[in-house]
Image: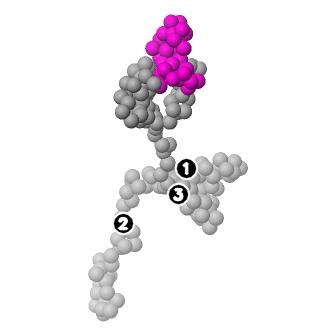
Amino acid sequence: MWDDNEDHSGWSLQQMFSSIDFTKLGIGKKADPVEDDQLTSKLKAMVGALIVANPGMTEQHAMSYLMHSPNGRAVAEHLNSISKRKEELMPQVDIFKLSNINSVVEIAKSITKGDAEISEMDFTKMLQGHAVLTKRAGESVGAAFERLLTAQTPDGAELRKAYILCKGMTSAGEELL
């Protein structure tokens, strides 16, 4: 190892150069191909974004701008920080555990309009899940389920229409409404 406090006057050139740690300088170290590919693909994506923003710019000019100008480096840093952020996923809703009757009725309306298709089993599970969450004190799940479907309200009528459609009884079910 090279030490500036030593006297090196009697050393040969080979001794001098072999004592220097060139790995700290990055000389002789091979780049990781995976890391190099990731860097190249990020740079290409940044160049593509810059060309979309400024269609008159060539690929070489955009790459030079990103790598060599202060403003371009700031743009590259900004684009890099955006790409590192994790995407926020939409919150997932379990339709079998809806406690809000309005949500259940909206799904029923989508079914009656023909915008959504759902099996009888899934619609029944959805209504039962709502019944479990909204049952009254001392009321069984079956009684809560019956209360949902027999309610003499516009919401109850909508639930019955959707239930009839899910069961496939459209012609026979008109009199049940």
Label 2 belongs to which residue?
28
Mark with earlier residue (3, 2) = 2
Mark 2 or 1 closer to N-term? Answer: 2
Q: Is residue 137 above or below residue 175?
A: below
In magenta, the rendered stretch is 148-177
The amino acid type, in three-letter code, at marker 2 is Gly
**Of callouts 1 and 3, the N-terminal one:** 1
> Rounded to the nearest whole Å, what is the CA distance between mark 3 and mark 2?
28 Å
Residue 78 as seen in the image, left or right of residue 146: right
Q: Mark 1 sits on what residue? A: 45
Q: Nearer the viewer, mark 1 or mark 3?
A: 3
Given residues 20 and 55, the one toward you in this image is 55
For label 2, the crowd category at 10 Å Cα-Cα, with few meaning under 14, some 14 to 19 and many 20 or more, is few
In this view, the residue farthest toward the front is 138
Q: Is residue 112 visible?
A: yes
Determine the secondary structure under disc 1: helix
Residue at 64 percent of width and 56 percent of height: 61
Asked which secondary structure carries label 2, the reply is: loop
User: Would residue 173 be counted in the magenta stretch?
Assistant: yes
Residue 8: give x, y in percent of width and height: 31, 90
Name the spot of residue 144 as percent of width and height, x first.
42, 27
Q: Looking at numbered disc 1 in the image, what kind of residue is underneath it? A: Ala
Q: Position of residue 109 (x, y in %)?
A: 57, 24
Q: Residue 36's image quarter?
A: bottom left
Q: Which dot, 3 or 2, sits closer to the camera? A: 3
Residue at the spot 54% in from the left edge and 21% down from the top edge: 152
Residue picked out by circle 3 = 80
